[in-house]
Amino acid sequence: MSSVRSTSQDPIHNGPWDVVVVGAGAAGLMTCLELPPDLNVLLLNRNAGRRSSSRWAQGGIAAVTGPDDSALFHGEDTLKAGAGLCDGDAVRLLVDQAPHCVERLLSLGMAFDRNPDGSLATTLEAAHSQHRVLHVQDRTGRALVDVLRERVEARPGLVHRRGVRVTQLWVEDQRCCGVQILDGPWLHWVPARAVVLATGGGGHLYTNTTNPPQACGEGVVLSWQAGAAVDDLEFVQFHPTALKLAHAPCFLISEAVRGEGAVLVDPSGRSPVAMLTQRDLAPRDQVSRALLQGMRTQGLSHLGLDLSPIPAEQAERRFPTILERCREYGLRPLQEPIPVAPAAHYWMGGVATDLQAATTIPGLFAVGEVACTGVHGANRLASNSLMECLVFARRLKDIALNERSAPTVSNQGLEPFKLSTAELMPGQDPESLHRSINALRAACWDMAGVDRRVNGMRQTLRELLQASSALQCSPLLEVMRNQEKDRCFQLEETCRSNLNLLLDLHHRQQASRLLLDACLFRTESRGGHYRSDAPSPLPQWRCHSRQVKGKSIHTRPVSD
């Protein structure tokens, strides 16, 4: 099958596809490289451009490469950061396989920074006991994605289509056997023997976030709607240091900056993290809460990150992207503290997977931030996430495909699908939908952010259930949900854009609802989940939360 690299005016061919991979960040790209070479693979990328959370990753990739480090130390640091909820088998797999993944990246052409003697350069990040974070200046994620994309584009039997959105998973006889997609004007079903979700996390459910807009929990929602289990959604990591300016979007100031010597300061030059044992390099949840407390006490919208302890030449060499971005906004980052504040950064929870990246639905797999592998527990150790993508993508070398061929459908007889905006979205204009999205993001930040407020979460959840119930009745969503597998609709442009917007709000509502349910369920504070009414961890809560559609939220044990 020939490789098609861009969006076509024709609908995507119905195969037969062996595997559909959804998402083209590090997890999706590495999956495509690791899948058996004889498989026909369809890579779907919701973005028409090249944005992904992976490209935004600045800090690096954690792996043992030095003689003074060991997998035991890496594992201990991961378990400690995870606050008792890391699954031991998943952590052992990660730390054991990480060095092999580094070798794999080097063979693919990844140009990590090196020391003068030629050895791999490493830096220290929060909660690591050793210098083990590999990097490419402060643009490691972008460098990784660029290398992987070049290799993926050369893979035989792969078709990469951009600007394509998965709208539903196709589950039949309790197996995942394809996806429903919105591909330009076309809405239709695509069969496959397996589907791999690599759609990223949900940081954009919050007003303040380091994540791009597509990181809204869509993969989690698609899986939950299809009947898959999702775990630990209450655990959200808030990065302590995102650029905070009134006229600028949140921009991550990598933890590696503090690893190289930068310190947090208030307007008087005092440390807002002096009470923490590891001060500026304490776990992210602790630093974020300390900053938030300091901001509230002093009535501030931000605090400062002082780079002056880092020699200027070293800072320019190590963090060119961060310094350039700060200067674009009129800051003098080497002369004055950078204004920073916490922002939603990484979702530890996600679609529950085993050590083979398999979900609870046969034929459905998940890799990367969309997945909950058990590695991160209640709080991700810095720079373990890109490595997790690589390790679990490699597990798909031996992917278990559905034995029987996927159902066949036909694209023949395309039917134009035409309804007026009023018919499709009665009482729902695009402006009101945008307002609803922004209001929901603000409510999540205020009530389920760094410091969670129980009464506020309950009220937000009640309002959310009402709004979600009303949106469910949208005629356009009904048409999408009930589309027969052998039908292919051609949508007018207004209809297509309205469906995209409805899905944005609908999926955000569902993801926020699952998040709030999980936050209210866990009546303790642990890792990335902090409740002001229950500020301490409790031994009976050393367990994972699990949500399955049609069942009450419940727990599952931690595997040691």
Image (cartoon, rainbow, N blue to C red):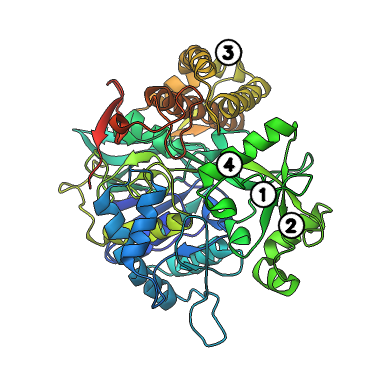
Is residue 69 visible in the rendered image? The answer is yes
Mark 1–mark 2 Cα distance, whole angstroms, equals 9 Å
Between 45 and 328, the one nearer to me in the picture: 328
Report the residue marked by disc 1: 251
Badge 3 crowding class, 10 Å Cα cut-off, few under 14, some 14 to 19, many 20 or more, is: few
CB atoms at circles 1 and 2 under 8 Å apart?
A: yes
**Nearest-to-viewer mark from 3 and 2:** 2
Amino acid type, label 3: Pro
Q: Is residue 519 above or below residue 21?
A: above
Report the residue marked by disc 3: 426
* Coordinates of residue 315 in the picture (x, y in percent): 70, 68
Whichever of labels 3 and 1 marks the residue nearer the N terminus, that label is 1
Mark 3–mark 2 Cα distance, whole angstroms, equals 43 Å
User: To which quarter of the image does residue 427 belong?
Assistant: top right
Report the residue marked by disc 4: 288
The residue tagged with tag 2: helix, strand or loop? helix
**Nearest-to-viewer mark from 1 and 4:** 4
User: To which quarter of the image does residue 420 belong?
Assistant: top right
Mark 1–mark 4 Cα distance, whole angstroms, equals 16 Å
| Count of numbered circles in the view | 4
Residue with the most extreme left position: 403
